[in-house]
Amino acid sequence: MLNIFEVNETNKMIEKENLDVRTITLGISLLDCIDADLKICNEKIYNKITTVAKDLVKTGKEIEKDFGIPIVNKRISVTPIALVGGAACKMSDDFVTLAKTLDRAATDVGVNLIGGYSALVSKGMTHADELLIRSIPKALAETERVCSSVNLGSTRTGINMDGVRLMGEIIKETAELTKDRESVSCMKLVVFCNAPDDNPFMAGAFHGVTEADAIINVGVSGPGVVKTALEKVRGENFEVLCETIKKTAFKVTRVGQLVAQEASKRLHIPFGIVDLSLAPTPAVGDSVADILCEIGLEYAGAPGTTAALALLNDQVKKGGVMASSYVGGLSGAFIPVSEDQGMIDAVAAGALTLEKLEAMTCVCSVGLDMLAVPGDTKATTISGIIADEMAIGMVNQKTTAVRIIPVIGKGVGEKVEFGGLFGYAPIMPVNPYSCDAFIGRGGRIPAPIHSFKN
């Protein structure tokens, strides 16, 4: 039970410190929509989504009103479409029809985004997986709300380097098809190593095959709350610092738990997990980079950044797991460039480079996120960046991801405007040296020795 002090404290965090529930994500299994007839498969998918999710947006708004807690997004994730469409889709364009059906269903129920236009290929690709992957550029260019993800590796299976090579080409093609809109479709495409089945955050959300028929997952966000708490303990030692972060993460997660349970009760759909990631926005005071500065760095990227981020991530998790029995998804600290004003400032100041960002991903929750690079960056270079990030995830038994945007027609020093929560980003330089021969080898990088635990 919340007492009046906690209620007042929560209200202050919402009003002055940018605390919000970033998303309620309704996961829906589409396994019962599989059909060999493409038209029937599309009909089943549309009917299932619009039936299960018909009250999602309305319920979210009611919870906002009743509890005074902002819920920024209402979203849907579905079973990876490569699995759902495998029986019906004989060519890539067939999968595009499924993407358009997802888009239409998402529009009709009023959600912001729908995730799950996905393939899981960490060990190898089926014919359906490859067809879906090759359809991604067209599918994202011709839809508004569909998000796509591809899992290319895992600690258990290694890294599918054929998939890594292909995704470098697909990302470039995706950028080209929307070059008149700042290559915007790349914002809706992410590649993973060790992708979780229950992630509520886009673009990587999908409904794993181990999940129930429908599930409610909630993602909370409170970088501003953590920063404000740390302002009160400036100059204190690391023990005080850690305790402050941990206590604050506990409070933030309790808000998410409350919303998740209430949504579950009202929608009559089981509660899955709370993802307690510190997800920033371009708003002033809602930055993970600003937390790192409050810990004691001049800019994110300065010496000590990786250690500060490791501390932050660990204490967020420790505080969160005490507040909810079902913490999942990614949970920790996101470090997207374009969505975090402090990160943008660090890049502009020359404090933060691609290589330092990669080092930071060893200890944070995701990976290289919302990173804008020159439009003439080669597909093999993008594949090399992906391979590096997949290796970090594989060896460290953690989720890593890459959401990279080669902005066609723009170069280093220029800026790209994405708008809304996506913000804007400076175009970052990329190492100019070739990895063509490495990416061209093909095959699979084996799983690390510590993956064998039977």
Image: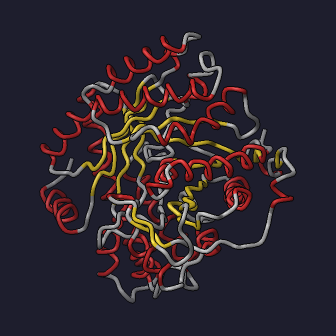
Would you identify the image quadrant in which residue 137 lies? top right
Give the residue displayed 73% in from the left and 43% down from the top: 163
Would you identify the image quadrant in which residue 345 lies? bottom left
Q: Is residue 441 shown above or below 151?
A: below
Could you tell me residue 288's position as x and y percent? 42, 70
Give the residue displayed 42% in from the left and 49% down from the top: 275
**Nearer-the-camera pick, 133 or 234:** 133
Position of residue 429 in the picture relative to residue 214 (left or right): right
Q: Is residue 185 shown above or below 433?
A: above
**Nearer-the-camera pick, 101 or 50:** 101
**Nearer-the-camera pick, 283 or 197:** 283
Would you identify the image quadrant in which residue 44 lies? top left
Q: Is residue 327 shown above or below 31?
A: below
Could you tell me residue 418's position as x and y percent? 40, 60
Could you tell me residue 178's position as x and y percent? 49, 50
Q: Quadrant of the C terminus?
A: top right
Could you tell me residue 20's position as x and y percent? 27, 55
Q: Is residue 195 shown above or below 100?
A: below
Give the residue displayed 44% in from the left and 47% down from the top: 201
Position of residue 46 in the picture relative to residue 314 (left or right): left
Position of residue 11 in the picture relative to residue 175 (left or right): left
